[in-house]
Amino acid sequence: MPVYEYIALDVGGRRRKGIIDAGSITAARQKLRETDVFPVEIVETADRKREEEAGRGGAIRLFRRVGLRELALMTRQLATLIGAGLPLVPSLAALVAQIRHPVLRTTLAQIKDEVNEGMSLTQSMSHFPEVFPPFYINMVRAGEASGTINLVLDRLADFNETQQALRTKIRSALAYPLFMFFIGSGVLFFLVTFVVPNITKIFREMHQTLPAITVFLLVVSGFLRDFWWVIAIALVAAVVGVRSAVRKTEQGRYLWDRLKITAPLIGPLNRKIAVARFSRTLGTLLQSGVPLLTALEIAKNVVNNLVVAEQLRAAAKDVEEGQSLSAPLSRNDFFPPIAVEMIAVGEQSGNMEAMLFRIADSYEKEVEANVLMVTSLLEPAMILVMGAVVGFIVVSVLLPIFEMNQLVR
């Protein structure tokens, strides 16, 4: 059923805005008038099919994306409303009235309409895979089946908030080094392409023989000044080519994912992030009543790495044949031995969910510590590199001046 955004006046003449679902604009006007609201303007929002077609474009999809923060907040509010005893449809209606994110608001309005017509919350959410991932939908399904939907939604909100907090900490730690890199690169480019040529122009006008180091600097400076656009185009083409190979070919993505977990410095960090994400996802699913094999199928996709997913798929096959989870995990080169031992202890004690959460907490702390260590090493390394380049420029400019002084003496 279409969803309409409206601007209307109530009985007191106050201006009101909102959205309403109806079969047509005429039906929407009638529904508003029945609630003593008089519409001034009604505009149909994009229906689901047009949104999905438009969402295939990368730029449009970027603006339609619902972030973890918005999804966690919505989930927490829905859990609170249902936990307070409010029925599902009025709870969804209350969320629609207060959520400001346009895509999420329209999605919830359509979900409310479908649930009101007799569809389950899980079935309705599965119609919006761009908003609700399989992990989310399977947890809601388990909550509906067990009658603990409010508890499951609380766990979902906790999970999303934890993932968002980890992502924010990593981005915050990398922000300053990236800022230094771009600012420093811009300053060096300005020095080499504008300042150095103006200074060395004096030596050329005096027809002085320049040292080899100064000649080299002038060659680099001239190349950057005249062909900087070629370098920019080459870099953009390289980035676009690599991204296209990674996104559109299975082999390209597989090689990229292998590089992410084997590269020095960042490889161990990506492994720990994947272990933490897998453990927390699997623990949250099992705690919410999702069967182990289904939980493994979902969790292997959450790590977002084909190499790791392939190993987890093999482990899930062994579990399906009757083995414990720790046995196949101990045979692959992805899971650390400590994590495997903790999972084995959890299986033996019947408390694997708690062990998985403990693994996730431990590796998330290690990730934070490693990111801080890497960024603390990056900052002095970048300063040293920039200092060396600036020193090279200074020596290249001052060396002809020293030679002139020696000639004068």
Image (spheres, helix red, strand yellow):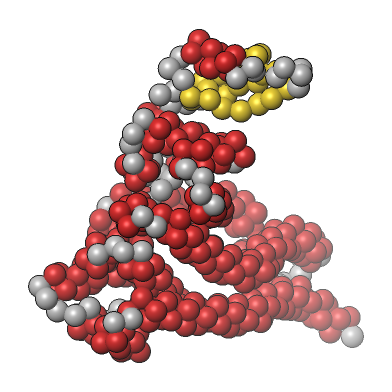
Residue 154 in view (yes/no): yes
Using the rendered image of the protein, determine whether residue 303 is visible from the camera's viewpoint. no
Residue at the spot 79% in from the left edge and 80% down from the top edge? 403
- Residue 327 vs residue 263, the one in the foreground: 327
The residue lying furthest to the right in this view is 409
Instruction: Give x and y (percent) for residue 235.
Output: 49, 55
Q: Nearer the viewer, residue 33 or 253?
A: 33
Quadrant of res 166: bottom right
Residue 271: image location, x then y, percent: 39, 76
Q: Give the side of residue 260 with respect to residue 100, left or right.
A: left
- How many marks can you see? 0
Residue name at image x 65 percent, y 26 percent: 17
Q: In which quarter of the image is the N terminus?
A: top left
As drawn, the residue found furthest toward the front would be 85
Q: Nearer the viewer, residue 340 or 201?
A: 340
Position of the C terminus by quadrant: bottom right
Image x and y of residue 280, in percent: 41, 71
Q: Which residue is painted at 41% across and 48% down in the image? A: 132
Residue at coordinates 48% horizontally, 13% vertically from top-left? Answer: 27
- Position of 83 compared to 257: left or right? right
Tell me if 65 is positioned left or right of 292 in this view.
right
Q: Which residue lies furthest to the left in this view?
A: 321
Instruction: Kindly indicate the quadrant of the structure image that contains residue 281.
Output: bottom left
Residue farthest along the top direction in this orientation: 26
- Of residues 328 and 288, the one nearer the viewer is 288
Residue 21 rendering spot, x and y as whole percentages:
48, 24
